[in-house]
Image (spheres, grey):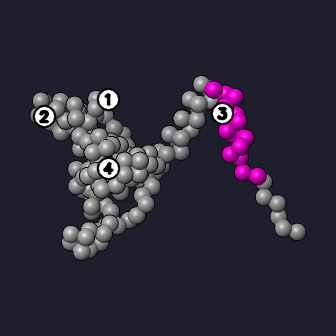
Amino acid sequence: MPMPELLARLARAVGVIPADLCTVGHERLVHLRVFASRSRARMARRLGIAEETYRQLETTGRRGTRAHDDRARDEWIAWDDRAAPAFGTTPERLPAALRRTEEYWPVLREQRWQRIREADPRWAATVGQTTRRPARHPRG
């Protein structure tokens, strides 16, 4: 997978849009960002949020807010309406990518834990034991 900027140059060179060069069954936020030829840092700046906040959004699909206060226009703007131009898409297409990102998060999390378990089983076991929730006892 080429870097977003390279994908954009390749697409221009052959006269297509970046999405035409990719095979994606279910678009997630990461795909929309890459199709828009933006790095995570550039997308975070474009959305006006911290890079780590954007990374969490792109990974989990969880947004902190559903609207943004646009002080220049003195009004609240729905997140889909504000973010869609940054992703180079429509407000109708963005929620589907957001939903797919949220649905994919458990799969991604399990893949990461599998790699950790393979790389360092003892550490993974220790973390697993310390993060287990204690059983709830009914009040008697």
**Inter-mark Cα distance, 1 to 3:** 30 Å
Of badges 3 and 2, nearer the viewer stands 3
Image point 28% across, 50% down: which residue? 45
For label 4, the residue is 44
Q: Residue lying farthest right?
A: 140
Q: How crowded is mark 1: few (under 14 residues within 10 Å), some or many (20 or more)?
A: few
Q: In front: 92, or 32? A: 32
**Inter-mark Cα distance, 1 to 4:** 21 Å
Q: Residue lying farthest top?
A: 119
Image point 44% across, 48% down: which residue? 56
**Inter-mark Cα distance, 2 to 4:** 24 Å
Disc assigned to residue 124 = 3
For label 1, the residue is 1
Q: Which of marks 2 and 4 is nearer the N terminus?
A: 2
Which x, y percent locates residue 92? Answer: 29, 59
Judge left or right: residue 86 versus residue 134: left
**Inter-mark Cα distance, 3 to 2:** 45 Å
What residue type is disc 1 on? Met
Judge left or right: residue 80 versus residue 137: left
**Inter-mark Cα distance, 4 to 3:** 32 Å
Q: Which of marks 1 and 3 is nearer the N terminus?
A: 1
**Which quadrant of the figure has residue 75?**
bottom left
Q: Earlier in the sequence, mark 1 or mark 4?
A: 1
